[in-house]
Amino acid sequence: MTTSLTRYEQRVHLVRDAVKANSKLDDKAAAELAVHVLHALDTIPEKVR
């Protein structure tokens, strides 16, 4: 059975993988950081991005 990831989950995985590739964080810590990073990016007004 295959499960589809939401766009948000895809974004979390993308950021998590980038964090893991550039740090010594484990999967869980990198995923938690990815959620915080995405939240911060999502709260930046569109005109500023």
Image (cartoon, rainbow, N blue to C red):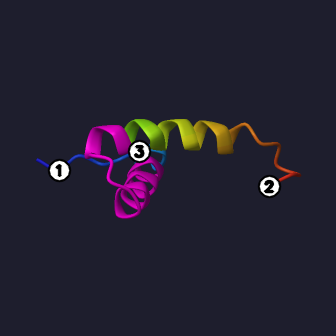
Amino acid type of the residue tagged 3 in the rendering: Glu
Rendered image quadrant of residue 38: top right
Question: Which residue is located at x 44 percent, y 47 percent?
Answer: 12
Q: Is residue 27 left or right of residue 39?
A: left
Q: What span is colored magenta in the figure?
A: 10-30
Amino acid type of the residue tagged 2 in the rendering: Arg
Q: CA distance from mark 3 to mark 2?
A: 21 Å
Q: Nearer the viewer, residue 18 or 6?
A: 18
Q: Is 11 covered by the magenta stretch?
A: yes
The residue that mark 3 highlights is: 9
Q: Is residue 15 left or right of residue 27?
A: right
The residue that mark 1 highlights is: 2
Label 1 or label 2, whichever comes before in sequence order: 1
Question: Tag 1: Cα neighbours inside 10 Å, few (<14), some, or many (≥20)?
Answer: few
Question: Can you give x and y, in whole percent of width and height, for residue 33 in the image?
Answer: 46, 40
Q: Nearer the viewer, mark 1 or mark 2?
A: 2
